[in-house]
Amino acid sequence: MISELFKSMLSTKSVIRELSEKAARMAMADPAHPIEIYDYSLGNPSVPAPAAVNEKMIEILRNEDPLLVHGYSPSLGIPSVKEKIAASLNRRFGMNYRGTDIFPTSGAAGALAHAFRLVTEPGDTILTFAPYFPEYGPYIVPTGCFLKAVPPDTENFQIDFDALDEALTPDVTALLINTPNNPSGAMYSEETLVRLASFLLFKEVEFGHEIWLISDEPYREIVFDGKKAPYVSSFYPRTLSCYSFSKSLSLPGERIGYLAVNPACGYSEMLVQMCGQISRGIGHNCPSALMQLTVAETCDLTSDISVYEANMNLLYDALTDLGLEIVRPGGTFYMMPKCPEPDSNLFSLKALRYNLVLVPCDSFALPGYFRIAYCTDTAKVERSLDAFRKFIRTEY
Amino acid sequence: MISELFKSMLSTKSVIRELSEKAARMAMADPAHPIEIYDYSLGNPSVPAPAAVNEKMIEILRNEDPLLVHGYSPSLGIPSVKEKIAASLNRRFGMNYRGTDIFPTSGAAGALAHAFRLVTEPGDTILTFAPYFPEYGPYIVPTGCFLKAVPPDTENFQIDFDALDEALTPDVTALLINTPNNPSGAMYSEETLVRLASFLLFKEVEFGHEIWLISDEPYREIVFDGKKAPYVSSFYPRTLSCYSFSKSLSLPGERIGYLAVNPACGYSEMLVQMCGQISRGIGHNCPSALMQLTVAETCDLTSDISVYEANMNLLYDALTDLGLEIVRPGGTFYMMPKCPEPDSNLFSLKALRYNLVLVPCDSFALPGYFRIAYCTDTAKVERSLDAFRKFIRTEY
């Protein structure tokens, strides 16, 4: 009596992970003579956590009562931690969060798992926008909801509102957005978010039911050109902000993030309490108490994310010089050029001949494009540019 | 469009948590003159984690590459950690686990969430035995399965096999057991486990389908009288062992444990891979990388759990002297005397007059009994004995 659903999911392989494993094998094909592979497949932070993170952790472990540090945290999270996170968001984004509007989670994946269950019933449709993170599919399957993608505005990867109007049917109870975006690096402008909010408010009246905005924003702090990402929740009251410290503090393995409910929705405290109920059923409970205490003290910091901007500029300039079409990223550590041939899988295979590991965007629901995850050493990015030149000039 | 299911769950309050909050209020009713309340409500470890845990954590934070320590762990857990846990289980319980049979989780709650989803389909029945941990209900609700309880053998809180025979209908695909048990402290004997295994093997043939044994065993190391808990999985091949380091290492807030699949079932590696799929859908992913690395090095240790046995003996002797009927616990930090009156809620209310906080077992599906969680300071247990004497002698 093995679960057929989860057994069947075993056969869905991750293209990204397969490519990354292939890259590792290629590098060590002859262990005596390892070759340099330019692996742009995985979105794993390449700069270490700020020193203050480990220092704070050691300070807590050394000085605090282990029964408190390692003890059960309240099921809705540690109140002092929640208040510090709220204060940081209020200070940086002009919000009015209280500690009781914040629900600590095990990363953005944990936050999304709670958000989906909070504002949908099985059978509802959740709408997202192509291109989108392929994990959204398996995240949503066990909720009993359906995921539907709005076709992209390939001009600048903002929102194609005509396409949205067509896709937004009354069975849609939540929209899932991701800005700055994986894989495109595009960041929604204030104009886009204002228009989205008014569009949703209008549709709520038309449909006679609420529509929630689930905002997946782990790249919120990784923004280029001295800009700041517009804070999604400040545009629309029914916003659930799903945040992770994985990228900003380079802590993906510690599984720490939060769900922030906009108090303007009118019943944010009840929703956070409901998160406590959802947690019981999905075996989540609270994230590590030590990590909650640590991020409370370091939530205004970031790793040295300037590396990502340097890498982006190097790659953007070199690839546009080679004639590739790219919408210049506003943030993240991704960019998504258009392939110079229609078959992005074939393009990716050819790239391997030049020691370049590039992810075709078919699994992001956008065939014909490829993703570069440039969270890597800048010197290595520089060395890869010749490989790109040889590849594009030889093959196209 | 708020989830009706999780909204409705808000109204189910935890008696344990309410009593514990009442105890805190009683203690501070007059802040100038706090009174001593004997709070036996919460099952929170009262002895700190072994010093080696914090030392190991600090050593890792100081000496290892932060990109590795805080980086994504593989979705099925860190291989070296899994191997060390398997080796520890093999050494201590004569098992044959490989690293690939172990799936690190965020505590036993996380392990149970995966176990339920692994071996059931929505609509199946999961059978457990009264008395049982009240959280099992909300843990199971969102899986779409039904939880049914077999009435207890109140003689010694082993298994009433006649009652089990009646309850085990073909819609049952998994049994959930918890030994040593919360709330009774009873530990299943080898004889009970042998009989249970042969009973299940027989029923599998009769029903023509597998029946899985989900073993919730966070108290496995807290065993009295110099004994060792029989290792459930060694008796039955289709066993999923759900373990937490919360109690043995006093780390409940760090949310670290594992699911161990008995390789004798024949496809344990596939089941662990399926856990990776289940994780995606419930937002769990891996537990903290740092905690995985830490327990790998400390999984053979325990906190100073001898305190719990000292407390148990003090309470058992004093309460049996007062004429209360108690099945002497084999382990845990709980015991479950029979109330001297039929209404255990009334009994618990009367106890409050004597500054004793005792949990009625109605929410554990066993009215007429109460639970004492004696994870507290031994000197305080000693001081509480007079309150027990006054209470029982005055009221009964």
Image: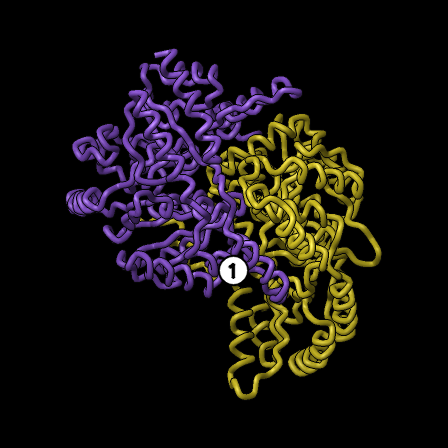
Chain colours: A yellow, B purple
Could you tell me which residue is drawn at 53 percent across and 27 percent down? B7
Q: Which residue is mark 1?
A: B293
Q: Residues within 10 Å of mark 1 (few under 14, many from 20)?
A: some
Confirm whether residue A3 shows in the render: no
Q: Residue furthest right?
A: A226
Residue drawn at 63 percent across, 55 percent down: A131
Q: Of all residues shown, which one is farthest toward the top?
A: B395
User: Which residue occupies 39% across, 25% down?
Assistant: B363
Residue A307 percent coordinates (x, y): 75, 65
In this orientation, which residue lies closer to the viewer: B83 or A164?
A: B83
Q: What is the secondary structure assignment of the residue under circle 1?
A: helix
Q: Is residue B227 left or right of residue B218?
A: left
Dividing the image into 4 quarters, which one contains the N terminus of chain B? Answer: top right
Three-letter code, disc 1: Leu
Asked if residue A267 is positioned above or below residue A330 in the image, the reply reads above
Residue B223 pos. (x, y %): 34, 44
Would you place residue A213 above or below residue A131 in this image?
A: above
Q: Residue at x 49, y 43 (%)?
A: B47
Q: Nearer the viewer, residue B255 or B5?
A: B255
Q: Position of residue A281 (x, y in %)?
A: 46, 37
| Chain letter of disc 1 in the image | B
Q: Position of residue A327 (x, y in %)?
A: 75, 61
